[in-house]
Each structure stands twice: as structure tokens, then as C-alpha cells.
Image (cartoon, grey):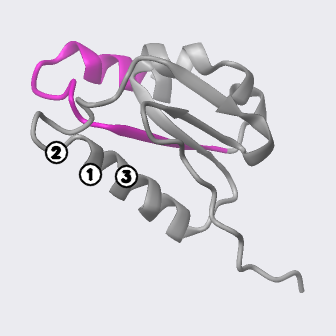
Amino acid sequence: MDGFEFCRALQQSPATRNIPVLAVTGRPEYLDQPERFRQAGILRVLMKPCEPESIAHALRELLGAGRGSGAGAGFAASVSTTASSGVISAGARPARRARSTARAT
């Protein structure tokens, strides 16, 4: 079972279908497949490498957006892709990629 199959399985259960899903991937070719993410119920995608702060920020947005009617319930079904930033997002708020603080050695 891959990550897409797992997320689709989450969508099948009433107990888990409203859990917002953030995917972190190292496969840039997936950015050309926003429909695949939408069908799996994945609301945000970050590209590796990404800073822990970026992950925390995206999770805060996902969890905050769904308050009141179940986590993730406030998101629209549309998916927009910003290939240059390595982020795919679904819903009203665009995902933002934080600046990297890593330094080359």
C-alpha cells in the first residue's frame, strides 16, 4: 500500500474522512498530478527537503481551517499547483513555503 492508497482508505471511513492530510514527498514529478492528490484527499503537499517550520506552519493552517465542523471540512475540492515553490494546495488558503535557513557547508 502506497501513501495515495492509504489516504484513499482514510476517505472511506466516516471516522477518518475529515482528517486533514499533509503529504511530504521527494518526488517532484508528483507536482504535475494535482488531481491524484485531490482524489486521495490530500490537502497540502510539500516537497523535500523542507524545513520543520514549513511542516508545522502547513499543519497549523490545515488544523485551523477546519475548526467548527471537523478538521479539513472547510476546504474546497479544487487543487492549485505552484510548481516553482514545490507546493500543491487545496482549499481557500494557499500553502506558503518558508525560506530555508540551511547553509551549504
The location of residue 56, given as percent across then percent down, is 43, 63
Q: Is mark 3 on a helix, strand or loop?
A: helix
Image position of 52 with respect to 79: above or below: below
Contact, CB < 8 Å: mark 1 with mark 3?
A: yes
Q: In which quarter of the image is the N terminus?
A: top left
Task: Give 38 or 1, whichever is nearer the viewer.
Answer: 38
Identified by mark 3, the residue type is Glu
The location of residue 22, given as percent across then percent down, is 44, 42
Count of labels in the image:
3
The location of residue 97, given as percent across then percent down, is 63, 56
Q: What element carries label 1?
A: helix
Provide the residue designation for mark 1.
Answer: 64
Provide the residue designation for mark 2.
Answer: 67
Q: State how far apart marks 1 and 3 are (Cα).
A: 5 Å
Q: What element carries label 2?
A: loop
- Residue at figure coordinates x 21%, y 24% from the top left: 17
The location of residue 30, given as percent across then percent down, is 69, 27
- Residue at figure coordinates x 45%, y 53% from the top left: 58
Range of residues picked out in magenta: 5-25
Q: State how far apart marks 2 and 3 are (Cα).
A: 10 Å
- Residue 2 makes an appearance in the image: no
In the image, residue 71 lies in the stretch drawn in magenta: no
Identified by mark 1, the residue type is Gly
Contact, CB < 8 Å: mark 1 with mark 2?
A: yes
Image position of 43 with respect to 51: above or below: above
- Residue at figure coordinates x 37%, y 52% from the top left: 61
Q: State how far apart marks 1 and 2 are (Cα).
A: 6 Å
Provide the residue designation for mark 3.
Answer: 61
Question: Mark 2 vs mark 3: which is more N-terminal?
Answer: 3
Give left or right: position of 94 versus 62.
right
Image position of 66 with respect to 2: above or below: below
Identified by mark 2, the residue type is Arg
